[in-house]
Image: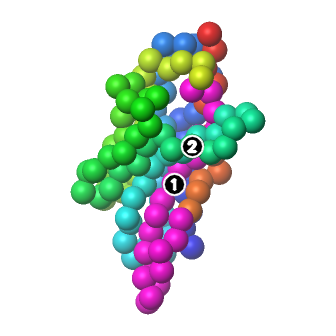
Amino acid sequence: QVQLVESGGGLVQAGGSLRLSCVASGSIFSINAMGWYRQAPGKQRELVATITPGGSTNSSDSVKGRFTISRDSAKNTVYLQMNSLKPEDTAVYYCYIKVRQGSLRTISNYWGQGTQVTVSS
């Protein structure tokens, strides 16, 4: 089992910044990737950004140049620095981790509880 604890969400004005953090703990053999997804009202969950232990990143075109994903491997922590926030960034942001677990090195995906980010115009 893996637990993800998210923090950093809140209410900000357009143009403002927030920094999300997510700490992973539990039974983990290795981490394949960590990242963030978001879900706005009436929409499906979508990718924001992911990062591998080697530092490779993948992000949505809608956040490139504004959001930066990073991680502290020693702490199993991933961050999302969000700058120049726009009202359309309003969503519940979910921490994500892909791990290998157990003797069979089973690949599993886990999600955090989600943290609300609201950007006012």
Left or right, 73 with reference to 89: left
Residue at position x 33%, y 56% in the image: 52
Mark seen at residue 46 = 2
**Res 118 → quadrant:** top right
Q: What span is colored magenta in the figure?
A: 89-109
Instruction: Give the secondary structure at mark 2.
Output: strand
Q: Residue furthest left?
A: 54
Is residue 95 or residue 76 the one in the foreground?
95
Residue drawn at 26 percent across, 51 percent down? 55
Residue at disc 1, secondary structure: strand
Rendered-image quadrant of the N terminus: bottom right
Residue 43 location (% of width, % of height): 69, 38
Task: Name the residue type under label 1.
Answer: Tyr
> Up-down: is 6 above or below 20?
below
Determine if the magenta segment contains residue 111.
no
Tell me the distance, in whole angstroms, between the alpha carbons under discs 2 and 1: 12 Å
Which residue in the structure is indicated by mark 1? 96
Residue 31 image offset from top left, x and y in percent: 38, 66
Which quarter of the image is occupied by the C terminus? top right
- In this rendered view, identify the residue nearer to me: 82 or 107: 107
